[in-house]
Image: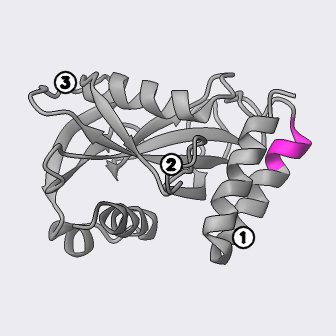
Amino acid sequence: MHRRPLLELLSRYEDRNPNENECVARIRELVRNHSDCFARDCLPGHVTASAWIVSSDHQRFLLTHHRKLERWLQLGGHADGDPDVHAVALREAQEESGMQGFDWVDGSGGDAAPVPLDVDVHVIPARKHEPVHEHHDVRFLLVARAGQDLAVSDESHALEWFAWERLESDFGEQSLVRMGRKARALLGV
């Protein structure tokens, strides 16, 4: 079953984050009940993947000012049928940042299988030909290799590196603050 790897990944995540079982259960329910959960036309929602990107010296994090949603977010997007959320997060990070070189950081403690940094279910407002729907987002931590230039994609207005000190003062969105706190804890910064 093409959904089994994601269900296993969610189980590993839940084992390490038992206080987040409600969110994991919502994603698991979508994945189990919708064979097309990786397609963007799956409703009431679909699986997405994203990356919290940190600079090579671990001193800054990268956000994109999303063109459609008009706010600062981590880089990521639709799976577009790809059940490998790990690969989707990397592809989106590369496409939306212009950088190609990243190193993975996860909370697996050396396990061979990756563990996401975070998971989240959030509502995407209706626009033109899209009804209100949910993104069931699986999020990974990436460290950008040094010496790469940023290139803004068509999906955003801007890309910007931010100092950690700005996380809680400048970004009130709970999921961004949560990801940033988790990343700092994993990196020890």
Q: Position of residue 97 (x, y in %)?
A: 27, 29
* Residue in the image at 20% along x and 33% along y: 145
Tell me how far mark 3 sits from mark 2, CA to CA. 21 Å
* Secondary structure character of the magenta stretch overall: helix
x then y, percent, for residue 2: 81, 27
Q: Is residue 98 visible?
A: yes
Whether the magenta-drawn stretch holds residue 86 is answered as: no
Distance between the Cα atoms at labels 2 and 1? 16 Å
Determine the secondary structure under disc 3.
Answer: loop
* Eye-nearest disc, 3 or 2: 2
Q: Where does label 3 land, which residue?
A: 151
- The crowding category of the residue bearing disc 1, from other C-alpha atoms within 10 Å (few below 14, some 14 to 19, many at least 20), is some
Provide the secondary structure element on which disc 2 rests: strand
Q: Quadrant of the N terminus?
A: top right
Which kind of residue does numbered mark 1 sit on? Answer: Asn
The stretch in magenta equals 30-34
Q: Are marks 1 and 3 in contact (CB under 8 Å)?
A: no
Disc 1 marks which residue? 21
The reply to whether callout 3 and callout 2 are in contact (CB within 8 Å) is no
Identify which amino acid the numbered label 2 is placed on. Answer: Arg
Callout 1: SS: helix
Q: Residue at x 8, y 28 (%)?
A: 147
Of the two numbered discs 3 and 2 on the same chain, state the one appearing first in sequence. 2
Please give the residue where the numbered disc 2 appears in the rendered image: 139
Amino acid residing under circle 3: Ala
Mark 3 neighbour class, 10 Å CA radius: few under 14, some 14 to 19, many 20 or more: some
